[in-house]
Amino acid sequence: MSDTNNNSGAVVPAVHIPPFSLRRRVTDRMMTGVAVLTVVLVLAPLFAIFAYLIYKGIGSINIAFLTQTPKPVGEPGGGMANAIVGSMVILAIASVLGVPLGIGAGIFLSEYGRNRYGDMVRFVSDVLNGVPSIVIGIVAYGLVVMRQKHFSALAGGVALAIMMVPTIARTTEQMLLLVPQAIREAAYGLGVSRWRTTISITLRTAASGVITGVMLAFARVAGETAPLLFTAFGNQFWNWKSDQPTAALSLQIFTYAISPFDEWHRQAWAGALVLIILIVGAVAAVRLAVRHGTLAGA
Amino acid sequence: MGVGITVEHLNAFYGKTQALFDINITVLANHATALIGPSGCGKSTFIRCLNRMHETIPDARVEGKVRIGDLSVYNGTSATQLRRRVGMVFQKPNPFPTMSIYDNVAAGLKLNGFTNRKQLEEVVQKSLHSAALWDEVKDSLHKKSGASLSGGQQQRLCIARALAVQPEVLLMDEPCSALDPISTGKIEELIFQLKEQYTIVIVTHNMQQAARVAEFTGFFLLGKMIEFDKTEKIFTNPSDKRTEDYVTGRFG
Protein backbone atom coordinates (compact mmCIF):
# COMPACT_ATOMS: atom_id res chain seq x y z
CA MET A 1 0.00 0.00 0.00
CA SER A 2 2.82 2.41 0.81
CA ASP A 3 4.45 1.80 -2.56
CA THR A 4 3.70 5.04 -4.45
CA ASN A 5 4.60 3.63 -7.86
CA ASN A 6 1.68 1.28 -7.49
CA ASN A 7 -1.62 2.47 -8.96
CA SER A 8 -3.81 0.73 -6.40
CA GLY A 9 -4.21 3.79 -4.18
CA ALA A 10 -4.83 6.26 -7.02
CA VAL A 11 -7.99 8.33 -7.24
CA VAL A 12 -10.13 7.98 -10.39
CA PRO A 13 -8.74 10.55 -12.89
CA ALA A 14 -10.91 13.62 -13.39
CA VAL A 15 -13.01 13.39 -16.55
CA HIS A 16 -14.44 16.28 -18.47
CA ILE A 17 -18.25 15.92 -18.70
CA PRO A 18 -19.52 18.18 -21.52
CA PRO A 19 -22.45 20.50 -20.77
CA PHE A 20 -25.93 19.45 -21.78
CA SER A 21 -25.67 20.53 -25.42
CA LEU A 22 -28.44 21.43 -27.87
CA ARG A 23 -27.72 18.25 -29.83
CA ARG A 24 -28.25 16.13 -26.72
CA ARG A 25 -31.46 17.92 -25.87
CA VAL A 26 -32.82 17.43 -29.38
CA THR A 27 -31.88 13.73 -29.37
CA ASP A 28 -33.51 13.33 -25.97
CA ARG A 29 -36.78 14.82 -27.22
CA MET A 30 -36.67 12.75 -30.40
CA MET A 31 -36.16 9.46 -28.63
CA THR A 32 -38.99 10.24 -26.18
CA GLY A 33 -41.18 11.00 -29.21
CA VAL A 34 -40.21 7.70 -30.85
CA ALA A 35 -41.07 5.81 -27.66
CA VAL A 36 -44.50 7.44 -27.43
CA LEU A 37 -45.12 6.78 -31.12
CA THR A 38 -44.38 3.05 -30.77
CA VAL A 39 -46.82 2.83 -27.85
CA VAL A 40 -49.50 4.47 -30.00
CA LEU A 41 -48.69 2.13 -32.90
CA VAL A 42 -49.01 -0.91 -30.64
CA LEU A 43 -52.26 0.20 -29.04
CA ALA A 44 -53.91 1.59 -32.20
CA PRO A 45 -54.91 -1.77 -33.74
CA LEU A 46 -56.38 -2.89 -30.42
CA PHE A 47 -58.56 0.18 -30.11
CA ALA A 48 -59.42 0.08 -33.81
CA ILE A 49 -60.63 -3.51 -33.49
CA PHE A 50 -62.62 -2.69 -30.38
CA ALA A 51 -64.21 0.41 -31.91
CA TYR A 52 -65.07 -1.35 -35.16
CA LEU A 53 -66.54 -4.36 -33.34
CA ILE A 54 -68.72 -2.14 -31.21
CA TYR A 55 -69.78 -0.12 -34.25
CA LYS A 56 -70.71 -3.21 -36.25
CA GLY A 57 -71.94 -5.48 -33.49
CA ILE A 58 -73.69 -3.46 -30.82
CA GLY A 59 -76.82 -3.01 -32.95
CA SER A 60 -77.50 -6.75 -33.11
CA ILE A 61 -76.98 -7.48 -29.43
CA ASN A 62 -80.30 -7.75 -27.66
CA ILE A 63 -82.08 -10.05 -25.24
CA ALA A 64 -83.00 -12.46 -28.02
CA PHE A 65 -79.37 -12.66 -29.21
CA LEU A 66 -78.24 -13.60 -25.72
CA THR A 67 -81.08 -16.02 -24.89
CA GLN A 68 -82.18 -17.74 -28.11
CA THR A 69 -80.72 -20.33 -30.45
CA PRO A 70 -80.18 -19.58 -34.16
CA LYS A 71 -83.25 -19.29 -36.38
CA PRO A 72 -83.36 -20.82 -39.88
CA VAL A 73 -82.27 -18.62 -42.78
CA GLY A 74 -84.85 -16.02 -43.71
CA GLU A 75 -86.53 -16.03 -40.33
CA PRO A 76 -85.57 -12.85 -38.47
CA GLY A 77 -84.29 -12.83 -34.86
CA GLY A 78 -82.70 -15.72 -33.06
CA GLY A 79 -79.39 -15.60 -31.24
CA MET A 80 -76.22 -17.34 -30.16
CA ALA A 81 -77.12 -18.31 -26.59
CA ASN A 82 -76.18 -21.94 -27.23
CA ALA A 83 -72.83 -20.87 -28.69
CA ILE A 84 -72.06 -18.58 -25.75
CA VAL A 85 -72.75 -21.38 -23.29
CA GLY A 86 -70.96 -23.89 -25.55
CA SER A 87 -67.83 -21.72 -25.65
CA MET A 88 -67.88 -21.46 -21.86
CA VAL A 89 -68.24 -25.25 -21.49
CA ILE A 90 -65.44 -25.98 -23.96
CA LEU A 91 -63.15 -23.41 -22.31
CA ALA A 92 -63.96 -24.80 -18.87
CA ILE A 93 -63.03 -28.32 -20.04
CA ALA A 94 -59.85 -26.97 -21.68
CA SER A 95 -58.87 -25.11 -18.48
CA VAL A 96 -59.57 -28.06 -16.19
CA LEU A 97 -57.36 -30.28 -18.37
CA GLY A 98 -54.73 -27.79 -19.52
CA VAL A 99 -54.02 -25.56 -16.51
CA PRO A 100 -52.94 -28.28 -14.02
CA LEU A 101 -50.93 -30.05 -16.71
CA GLY A 102 -49.25 -26.81 -17.81
CA ILE A 103 -48.45 -25.67 -14.27
CA GLY A 104 -47.22 -29.17 -13.40
CA ALA A 105 -44.90 -29.17 -16.41
CA GLY A 106 -43.70 -25.68 -15.48
CA ILE A 107 -42.92 -26.84 -11.94
CA PHE A 108 -41.00 -29.79 -13.31
CA LEU A 109 -38.99 -27.59 -15.68
CA SER A 110 -38.05 -25.04 -13.03
CA GLU A 111 -37.56 -27.23 -9.93
CA TYR A 112 -36.41 -30.58 -11.33
CA GLY A 113 -35.60 -29.91 -14.99
CA ARG A 114 -32.18 -28.26 -14.83
CA ASN A 115 -30.77 -31.17 -16.85
CA ARG A 116 -30.86 -32.89 -20.25
CA TYR A 117 -34.31 -34.34 -19.70
CA GLY A 118 -35.63 -30.89 -18.85
CA ASP A 119 -34.00 -29.43 -21.97
CA MET A 120 -35.81 -32.06 -24.00
CA VAL A 121 -39.19 -31.20 -22.47
CA ARG A 122 -38.45 -27.49 -23.03
CA PHE A 123 -37.67 -28.12 -26.71
CA VAL A 124 -40.74 -30.28 -27.28
CA SER A 125 -42.93 -27.72 -25.56
CA ASP A 126 -41.59 -24.94 -27.78
CA VAL A 127 -42.24 -27.04 -30.86
CA LEU A 128 -45.77 -27.78 -29.65
CA ASN A 129 -46.27 -24.05 -29.25
CA GLY A 130 -45.50 -23.62 -32.95
CA VAL A 131 -47.73 -26.42 -34.26
CA PRO A 132 -50.59 -24.96 -36.36
CA SER A 133 -53.84 -25.04 -34.43
CA ILE A 134 -55.64 -27.00 -37.15
CA VAL A 135 -53.11 -29.80 -36.75
CA ILE A 136 -53.88 -29.89 -33.05
CA GLY A 137 -57.54 -30.16 -34.03
CA ILE A 138 -56.69 -33.25 -36.09
CA VAL A 139 -54.83 -34.75 -33.12
CA ALA A 140 -57.88 -34.25 -30.88
CA TYR A 141 -60.03 -35.70 -33.65
CA GLY A 142 -57.88 -38.82 -33.63
CA LEU A 143 -57.67 -39.01 -29.85
CA VAL A 144 -61.28 -38.33 -28.88
CA VAL A 145 -63.68 -38.08 -31.84
CA MET A 146 -62.59 -41.32 -33.54
CA ARG A 147 -62.93 -43.20 -30.27
CA GLN A 148 -66.26 -41.71 -29.23
CA LYS A 149 -67.53 -41.96 -32.80
CA HIS A 150 -68.97 -38.46 -32.66
CA PHE A 151 -68.00 -34.81 -32.23
CA SER A 152 -68.14 -33.40 -28.72
CA ALA A 153 -67.37 -30.51 -26.37
CA LEU A 154 -64.86 -32.84 -24.73
CA ALA A 155 -62.93 -33.20 -27.99
CA GLY A 156 -62.92 -29.41 -28.44
CA GLY A 157 -61.75 -28.98 -24.85
CA VAL A 158 -58.93 -31.48 -25.37
CA ALA A 159 -57.77 -29.64 -28.50
CA LEU A 160 -57.70 -26.27 -26.71
CA ALA A 161 -56.05 -27.83 -23.63
CA ILE A 162 -53.20 -29.13 -25.80
CA MET A 163 -52.72 -25.58 -27.07
CA MET A 164 -52.70 -24.12 -23.55
CA VAL A 165 -50.14 -26.48 -22.05
CA PRO A 166 -46.88 -25.23 -23.65
CA THR A 167 -47.65 -21.55 -23.02
CA ILE A 168 -48.57 -22.17 -19.38
CA ALA A 169 -45.61 -24.49 -18.86
CA ARG A 170 -43.04 -22.00 -20.12
CA THR A 171 -44.47 -18.96 -18.32
CA THR A 172 -44.83 -20.94 -15.08
CA GLU A 173 -41.21 -22.05 -15.42
CA GLN A 174 -40.03 -18.46 -15.93
CA MET A 175 -42.06 -17.17 -12.99
CA LEU A 176 -40.83 -19.90 -10.62
CA LEU A 177 -37.23 -19.23 -11.65
CA LEU A 178 -37.70 -15.62 -10.57
CA VAL A 179 -38.33 -16.76 -6.99
CA PRO A 180 -34.99 -16.34 -5.17
CA GLN A 181 -33.26 -19.51 -4.00
CA ALA A 182 -33.11 -17.92 -0.53
CA ILE A 183 -36.89 -18.24 -0.21
CA ARG A 184 -36.73 -21.98 -0.90
CA GLU A 185 -33.83 -22.34 1.54
CA ALA A 186 -35.85 -20.55 4.22
CA ALA A 187 -38.52 -23.24 3.90
CA TYR A 188 -36.01 -26.12 3.80
CA GLY A 189 -34.43 -24.65 6.92
CA LEU A 190 -37.75 -25.04 8.74
CA GLY A 191 -37.85 -28.74 7.94
CA VAL A 192 -40.38 -28.39 5.14
CA SER A 193 -40.09 -31.08 2.49
CA ARG A 194 -39.15 -30.27 -1.07
CA TRP A 195 -42.54 -30.83 -2.70
CA ARG A 196 -44.33 -28.94 0.06
CA THR A 197 -41.90 -26.05 -0.40
CA THR A 198 -42.57 -26.06 -4.13
CA ILE A 199 -46.35 -25.98 -3.72
CA SER A 200 -46.81 -23.82 -0.63
CA ILE A 201 -43.86 -21.46 -0.90
CA THR A 202 -42.37 -21.23 -4.40
CA LEU A 203 -45.60 -21.51 -6.37
CA ARG A 204 -47.40 -19.24 -3.92
CA THR A 205 -44.68 -16.60 -4.17
CA ALA A 206 -44.86 -16.70 -7.97
CA ALA A 207 -48.67 -16.97 -8.05
CA SER A 208 -49.51 -13.65 -9.69
CA GLY A 209 -47.07 -14.28 -12.54
CA VAL A 210 -48.27 -17.84 -13.02
CA ILE A 211 -51.89 -16.63 -13.14
CA THR A 212 -50.97 -14.02 -15.75
CA GLY A 213 -49.50 -16.81 -17.87
CA VAL A 214 -52.64 -18.89 -17.47
CA MET A 215 -54.84 -15.95 -18.47
CA LEU A 216 -52.66 -15.33 -21.54
CA ALA A 217 -53.06 -18.93 -22.61
CA PHE A 218 -56.79 -18.81 -21.88
CA ALA A 219 -57.32 -15.63 -23.90
CA ARG A 220 -55.35 -17.06 -26.77
CA VAL A 221 -57.34 -20.28 -27.12
CA ALA A 222 -60.71 -18.66 -26.34
CA GLY A 223 -60.91 -17.28 -29.87
CA GLU A 224 -59.54 -20.37 -31.65
CA THR A 225 -61.73 -21.68 -34.45
CA ALA A 226 -59.62 -24.12 -36.44
CA PRO A 227 -59.09 -26.72 -33.69
CA LEU A 228 -62.86 -26.79 -33.03
CA LEU A 229 -63.93 -27.38 -36.66
CA PHE A 230 -63.82 -31.15 -36.42
CA THR A 231 -63.83 -31.60 -32.66
CA ALA A 232 -66.68 -29.56 -31.13
CA PHE A 233 -68.10 -29.24 -34.66
CA GLY A 234 -70.85 -26.75 -33.79
CA ASN A 235 -74.55 -27.17 -33.17
CA GLN A 236 -77.63 -25.10 -34.03
CA PHE A 237 -79.51 -26.23 -30.95
CA TRP A 238 -79.05 -26.39 -27.19
CA ASN A 239 -76.84 -29.19 -26.04
CA TRP A 240 -76.10 -29.90 -22.38
CA LYS A 241 -74.05 -33.05 -22.86
CA SER A 242 -70.28 -32.81 -23.07
CA ASP A 243 -70.16 -35.86 -25.38
CA GLN A 244 -72.36 -34.32 -28.07
CA PRO A 245 -71.54 -31.83 -30.86
CA THR A 246 -71.44 -28.42 -29.23
CA ALA A 247 -71.75 -24.87 -30.55
CA ALA A 248 -68.94 -22.38 -29.92
CA LEU A 249 -68.90 -18.64 -30.53
CA SER A 250 -65.86 -18.77 -32.78
CA LEU A 251 -67.42 -21.53 -34.92
CA GLN A 252 -70.71 -19.68 -35.13
CA ILE A 253 -68.92 -16.49 -36.16
CA PHE A 254 -67.04 -18.41 -38.83
CA THR A 255 -70.17 -20.05 -40.23
CA TYR A 256 -72.16 -16.83 -40.22
CA ALA A 257 -69.36 -14.67 -41.60
CA ILE A 258 -68.85 -16.80 -44.74
CA SER A 259 -72.60 -17.09 -45.36
CA PRO A 260 -74.28 -14.95 -48.05
CA PHE A 261 -76.93 -13.50 -45.71
CA ASP A 262 -76.77 -9.95 -44.36
CA GLU A 263 -78.66 -10.85 -41.17
CA TRP A 264 -76.09 -13.56 -40.41
CA HIS A 265 -73.24 -11.12 -41.06
CA ARG A 266 -74.69 -8.73 -38.50
CA GLN A 267 -75.02 -11.58 -36.01
CA ALA A 268 -71.40 -12.62 -36.67
CA TRP A 269 -70.26 -9.12 -35.70
CA ALA A 270 -72.35 -9.26 -32.56
CA GLY A 271 -70.92 -12.69 -31.74
CA ALA A 272 -67.36 -11.38 -32.13
CA LEU A 273 -68.14 -8.51 -29.78
CA VAL A 274 -69.63 -10.86 -27.18
CA LEU A 275 -66.61 -13.16 -27.46
CA ILE A 276 -64.16 -10.29 -26.83
CA ILE A 277 -66.24 -9.00 -23.92
CA LEU A 278 -66.28 -12.49 -22.40
CA ILE A 279 -62.49 -12.85 -22.69
CA VAL A 280 -61.77 -9.38 -21.31
CA GLY A 281 -64.31 -9.96 -18.55
CA ALA A 282 -62.77 -13.29 -17.52
CA VAL A 283 -59.23 -11.88 -17.48
CA ALA A 284 -60.31 -8.78 -15.54
CA ALA A 285 -62.25 -10.86 -13.00
CA VAL A 286 -59.26 -13.09 -12.31
CA ARG A 287 -56.95 -10.06 -11.97
CA LEU A 288 -59.32 -8.42 -9.53
CA ALA A 289 -59.60 -11.59 -7.48
CA VAL A 290 -55.81 -11.88 -7.34
CA ARG A 291 -55.38 -8.25 -6.30
CA HIS A 292 -58.01 -8.64 -3.62
CA GLY A 293 -56.05 -11.51 -2.06
CA THR A 294 -52.74 -9.63 -1.88
CA LEU A 295 -51.31 -8.03 1.26
CA ALA A 296 -50.06 -4.51 1.74
CA GLY A 297 -46.37 -4.33 0.92
CA ALA A 298 -46.27 -7.71 -0.81
CA MET B 1 -33.28 -26.94 25.73
CA GLY B 2 -30.22 -26.91 23.56
CA VAL B 3 -28.14 -29.96 22.73
CA GLY B 4 -24.46 -30.39 21.95
CA ILE B 5 -22.91 -30.96 18.54
CA THR B 6 -20.02 -33.29 17.72
CA VAL B 7 -18.33 -33.22 14.35
CA GLU B 8 -15.75 -35.83 13.36
CA HIS B 9 -13.61 -35.89 10.23
CA LEU B 10 -15.99 -33.77 8.18
CA ASN B 11 -15.09 -33.22 4.51
CA ALA B 12 -17.34 -31.27 2.16
CA PHE B 13 -17.21 -30.93 -1.61
CA TYR B 14 -18.69 -28.88 -4.41
CA GLY B 15 -18.39 -31.24 -7.34
CA LYS B 16 -14.65 -31.98 -7.54
CA THR B 17 -13.59 -29.02 -5.40
CA GLN B 18 -13.06 -29.79 -1.74
CA ALA B 19 -14.31 -26.97 0.49
CA LEU B 20 -13.76 -28.46 3.95
CA PHE B 21 -10.87 -30.63 5.12
CA ASP B 22 -11.18 -32.96 8.10
CA ILE B 23 -13.08 -30.73 10.51
CA ASN B 24 -13.33 -31.89 14.13
CA ILE B 25 -15.23 -29.88 16.68
CA THR B 26 -17.37 -30.21 19.79
CA VAL B 27 -19.97 -27.53 20.45
CA LEU B 28 -21.32 -27.28 23.99
CA ALA B 29 -25.06 -27.18 24.59
CA ASN B 30 -26.60 -23.82 25.54
CA HIS B 31 -23.55 -21.85 24.56
CA ALA B 32 -22.88 -19.57 21.63
CA THR B 33 -20.05 -20.63 19.36
CA ALA B 34 -18.68 -18.23 16.77
CA LEU B 35 -16.91 -19.18 13.54
CA ILE B 36 -14.60 -16.59 12.05
CA GLY B 37 -12.27 -16.47 9.09
CA PRO B 38 -11.76 -14.66 5.79
CA SER B 39 -14.30 -14.90 2.93
CA GLY B 40 -14.34 -18.25 1.19
CA CYS B 41 -12.69 -20.10 4.07
CA GLY B 42 -15.57 -22.58 4.41
CA LYS B 43 -17.32 -21.38 7.55
CA SER B 44 -20.67 -20.99 5.76
CA THR B 45 -20.23 -24.37 4.10
CA PHE B 46 -19.50 -25.84 7.52
CA ILE B 47 -22.60 -24.43 9.16
CA ARG B 48 -24.69 -25.62 6.20
CA CYS B 49 -23.36 -29.15 6.77
CA LEU B 50 -24.86 -29.12 10.25
CA ASN B 51 -28.44 -28.99 9.00
CA ARG B 52 -27.80 -30.67 5.65
CA MET B 53 -28.44 -27.51 3.65
CA HIS B 54 -25.15 -28.16 1.87
CA GLU B 55 -26.63 -31.05 -0.07
CA THR B 56 -29.42 -28.92 -1.57
CA ILE B 57 -26.80 -27.52 -3.96
CA PRO B 58 -26.38 -29.65 -7.09
CA ASP B 59 -23.23 -31.85 -7.04
CA ALA B 60 -22.44 -30.99 -3.42
CA ARG B 61 -21.59 -33.82 -1.02
CA VAL B 62 -20.36 -34.47 2.50
CA GLU B 63 -18.21 -37.12 4.21
CA GLY B 64 -17.77 -37.67 7.92
CA LYS B 65 -19.80 -37.84 11.10
CA VAL B 66 -22.01 -35.19 12.67
CA ARG B 67 -24.03 -35.76 15.83
CA ILE B 68 -26.55 -33.25 17.11
CA GLY B 69 -27.84 -34.32 20.52
CA ASP B 70 -28.91 -37.94 20.02
CA LEU B 71 -29.32 -37.56 16.24
CA SER B 72 -26.80 -38.90 13.79
CA VAL B 73 -27.09 -36.25 11.09
CA TYR B 74 -25.80 -38.24 8.12
CA ASN B 75 -26.96 -41.66 9.21
CA GLY B 76 -30.57 -42.65 9.58
CA THR B 77 -32.08 -39.19 9.99
CA SER B 78 -34.04 -37.54 7.21
CA ALA B 79 -33.03 -34.01 6.30
CA THR B 80 -36.51 -32.66 7.03
CA GLN B 81 -36.64 -34.33 10.46
CA LEU B 82 -33.24 -32.92 11.31
CA ARG B 83 -34.05 -29.39 10.18
CA ARG B 84 -37.07 -29.24 12.46
CA ARG B 85 -34.64 -29.52 15.35
CA VAL B 86 -31.89 -27.35 13.88
CA GLY B 87 -33.14 -23.89 12.93
CA MET B 88 -31.30 -21.56 10.59
CA VAL B 89 -31.07 -17.82 10.11
CA PHE B 90 -29.55 -16.69 6.83
CA GLN B 91 -27.22 -13.91 5.81
CA LYS B 92 -29.88 -11.90 3.99
CA PRO B 93 -33.28 -11.67 5.66
CA ASN B 94 -35.60 -13.93 3.64
CA PRO B 95 -39.17 -13.67 4.88
CA PHE B 96 -41.82 -15.27 2.65
CA PRO B 97 -42.84 -12.21 0.62
CA THR B 98 -46.48 -13.13 -0.02
CA MET B 99 -47.24 -14.08 3.59
CA SER B 100 -48.36 -11.85 6.45
CA ILE B 101 -46.14 -11.41 9.49
CA TYR B 102 -48.25 -13.95 11.37
CA ASP B 103 -48.13 -16.50 8.55
CA ASN B 104 -44.38 -16.09 8.24
CA VAL B 105 -43.87 -17.10 11.86
CA ALA B 106 -46.51 -19.83 11.67
CA ALA B 107 -45.17 -21.19 8.35
CA GLY B 108 -42.82 -23.81 9.80
CA LEU B 109 -45.53 -25.38 11.96
CA LYS B 110 -48.34 -25.03 9.41
CA LEU B 111 -46.36 -26.55 6.57
CA ASN B 112 -45.38 -29.43 8.81
CA GLY B 113 -49.01 -30.25 9.39
CA PHE B 114 -49.69 -28.46 12.69
CA THR B 115 -53.32 -27.33 12.73
CA ASN B 116 -54.33 -26.36 16.30
CA ARG B 117 -55.13 -22.68 15.76
CA LYS B 118 -55.14 -21.63 19.36
CA GLN B 119 -51.78 -23.18 20.12
CA LEU B 120 -50.45 -21.78 16.86
CA GLU B 121 -51.43 -18.29 17.94
CA GLU B 122 -49.65 -18.78 21.25
CA VAL B 123 -46.49 -20.05 19.57
CA VAL B 124 -46.44 -17.13 17.13
CA GLN B 125 -46.84 -14.63 19.94
CA LYS B 126 -44.16 -16.28 22.05
CA SER B 127 -41.73 -16.52 19.15
CA LEU B 128 -42.19 -12.86 18.26
CA HIS B 129 -41.60 -11.96 21.91
CA SER B 130 -38.44 -14.08 21.99
CA ALA B 131 -37.21 -12.36 18.84
CA ALA B 132 -37.92 -8.95 20.40
CA LEU B 133 -40.24 -8.01 17.58
CA TRP B 134 -43.67 -8.33 19.18
CA ASP B 135 -44.11 -4.70 20.25
CA GLU B 136 -43.23 -3.43 16.79
CA VAL B 137 -45.61 -5.66 14.83
CA LYS B 138 -48.43 -6.66 17.19
CA ASP B 139 -50.90 -4.28 15.50
CA SER B 140 -50.26 -5.44 11.95
CA LEU B 141 -49.76 -9.20 12.33
CA HIS B 142 -52.28 -10.10 9.65
CA LYS B 143 -52.37 -6.86 7.70
CA LYS B 144 -48.76 -6.44 6.67
CA SER B 145 -46.55 -8.67 4.58
CA GLY B 146 -43.25 -9.83 6.02
CA ALA B 147 -41.47 -8.07 3.19
CA SER B 148 -42.84 -4.66 4.23
CA LEU B 149 -40.73 -4.57 7.41
CA SER B 150 -37.32 -2.91 7.63
CA GLY B 151 -34.19 -5.01 7.14
CA GLY B 152 -33.50 -5.38 10.85
CA GLN B 153 -37.12 -6.24 11.59
CA GLN B 154 -37.13 -8.76 8.75
CA GLN B 155 -34.12 -10.50 10.24
CA ARG B 156 -35.80 -10.67 13.66
CA LEU B 157 -38.90 -11.99 11.90
CA CYS B 158 -36.74 -14.73 10.40
CA ILE B 159 -35.38 -15.51 13.86
CA ALA B 160 -38.95 -15.71 15.20
CA ARG B 161 -39.86 -17.98 12.30
CA ALA B 162 -36.95 -20.29 13.13
CA LEU B 163 -37.80 -20.30 16.87
CA ALA B 164 -41.47 -21.15 16.23
CA VAL B 165 -40.52 -24.69 15.18
CA GLN B 166 -38.92 -25.01 18.64
CA PRO B 167 -35.47 -26.15 17.57
CA GLU B 168 -32.67 -27.23 19.89
CA VAL B 169 -29.92 -25.65 17.86
CA LEU B 170 -29.94 -22.31 16.05
CA LEU B 171 -27.50 -21.80 13.19
CA MET B 172 -26.86 -18.21 12.17
CA ASP B 173 -24.99 -17.51 8.95
CA GLU B 174 -23.73 -13.93 9.19
CA PRO B 175 -27.11 -12.76 10.47
CA CYS B 176 -26.07 -9.12 10.84
CA SER B 177 -24.04 -8.54 7.68
CA ALA B 178 -26.93 -6.77 5.93
CA LEU B 179 -27.97 -4.72 8.96
CA ASP B 180 -27.13 -1.32 10.43
CA PRO B 181 -25.37 -1.04 13.83
CA ILE B 182 -28.60 -0.50 15.80
CA SER B 183 -30.29 -3.58 14.35
CA THR B 184 -27.04 -5.48 14.81
CA GLY B 185 -27.02 -4.49 18.47
CA LYS B 186 -30.56 -5.76 18.90
CA ILE B 187 -29.75 -9.11 17.32
CA GLU B 188 -26.62 -9.52 19.44
CA GLU B 189 -28.62 -8.83 22.57
CA LEU B 190 -31.07 -11.41 21.37
CA ILE B 191 -28.36 -14.02 20.84
CA PHE B 192 -27.26 -13.39 24.39
CA GLN B 193 -30.73 -14.23 25.70
CA LEU B 194 -31.40 -17.08 23.29
CA LYS B 195 -28.40 -19.13 24.30
CA GLU B 196 -30.07 -19.87 27.61
CA GLN B 197 -32.49 -22.05 25.69
CA TYR B 198 -30.71 -22.94 22.49
CA THR B 199 -27.30 -23.97 21.30
CA ILE B 200 -26.15 -21.25 18.94
CA VAL B 201 -23.56 -21.48 16.18
CA ILE B 202 -22.91 -18.16 14.50
CA VAL B 203 -20.78 -17.39 11.47
CA THR B 204 -19.51 -13.84 11.46
CA HIS B 205 -17.12 -11.55 9.65
CA ASN B 206 -17.13 -9.19 12.56
CA MET B 207 -14.56 -10.20 15.14
CA GLN B 208 -15.90 -7.82 17.76
CA GLN B 209 -19.24 -9.52 17.35
CA ALA B 210 -17.69 -12.92 17.95
CA ALA B 211 -15.98 -11.54 21.05
CA ARG B 212 -19.23 -10.02 22.30
CA VAL B 213 -21.63 -12.92 21.90
CA ALA B 214 -19.71 -16.19 21.90
CA GLU B 215 -18.01 -18.24 24.62
CA PHE B 216 -16.18 -20.32 22.05
CA THR B 217 -14.65 -19.34 18.74
CA GLY B 218 -13.34 -21.36 15.82
CA PHE B 219 -10.97 -19.90 13.24
CA PHE B 220 -11.26 -21.22 9.68
CA LEU B 221 -8.72 -20.75 6.91
CA LEU B 222 -8.80 -22.28 3.42
CA GLY B 223 -11.29 -24.98 4.38
CA LYS B 224 -9.44 -26.09 7.52
CA MET B 225 -10.19 -25.33 11.11
CA ILE B 226 -7.00 -23.81 12.39
CA GLU B 227 -7.94 -23.31 16.00
CA PHE B 228 -10.91 -23.81 18.26
CA ASP B 229 -10.90 -22.54 21.82
CA LYS B 230 -12.48 -20.22 24.34
CA THR B 231 -13.19 -16.90 22.70
CA GLU B 232 -10.99 -15.06 25.19
CA LYS B 233 -8.04 -17.27 24.37
CA ILE B 234 -8.52 -16.92 20.60
CA PHE B 235 -8.49 -13.15 20.80
CA THR B 236 -5.84 -12.62 23.47
CA ASN B 237 -3.47 -15.54 23.32
CA PRO B 238 -4.02 -17.80 20.29
CA SER B 239 -1.83 -20.90 19.93
CA ASP B 240 -1.48 -20.65 16.18
CA LYS B 241 0.46 -17.94 14.38
CA ARG B 242 -2.17 -17.75 11.59
CA THR B 243 -4.95 -17.12 14.09
CA GLU B 244 -2.93 -14.38 15.67
CA ASP B 245 -2.26 -12.77 12.29
CA TYR B 246 -5.96 -12.81 11.49
CA VAL B 247 -7.34 -11.50 14.76
CA THR B 248 -4.76 -8.75 14.91
CA GLY B 249 -5.66 -7.73 11.36
CA ARG B 250 -2.38 -8.58 9.74
CA PHE B 251 -4.17 -10.30 6.86
CA GLY B 252 -7.64 -11.10 5.60
Image (tube, coloured by chain):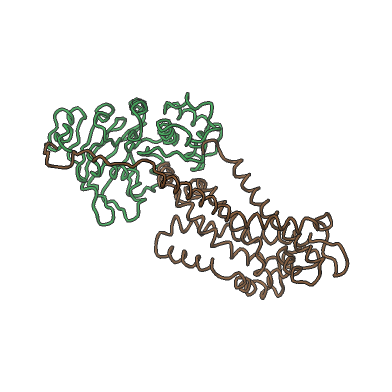
Chain colours: A brown, B green
Q: Position of residue A88 (x, y in %)?
A: 71, 58
Report whether residue B122 is seen.
Answer: yes
Query: Which residue appears at 59% of the width and 41% of the height?
Result: A293
User: Looking at this rendering, what residue extends furthest in the right direction?
Assistant: A75
Q: Position of residue A143 (x, y in %)?
A: 62, 72
For the residue pair B247 and B50, the one nearer the viewer reads as B247
Q: Position of residue B166 (x, y in %)?
A: 42, 34
User: Looking at this rendering, what residue extends furthest in the top direction?
Assistant: B135
Is A22 located above or below residue B28 in the figure? below
For the residue pair A199 and A166, the one nearer the viewer reads as A166
Position of residue A195 in the picture relative to residue A94 (left or right): left
For the residue pair B123 and B155, the one nearer the viewer reads as B155
Is A125 located above or below residue B152 in the figure? below
The image quadrant that residue B209 belongs to is: top left
Position of residue B209 in the picture relative to residue B194 (left or right): left
Query: Which residue appears at 66% of the width and 74% of the height?
Result: A147
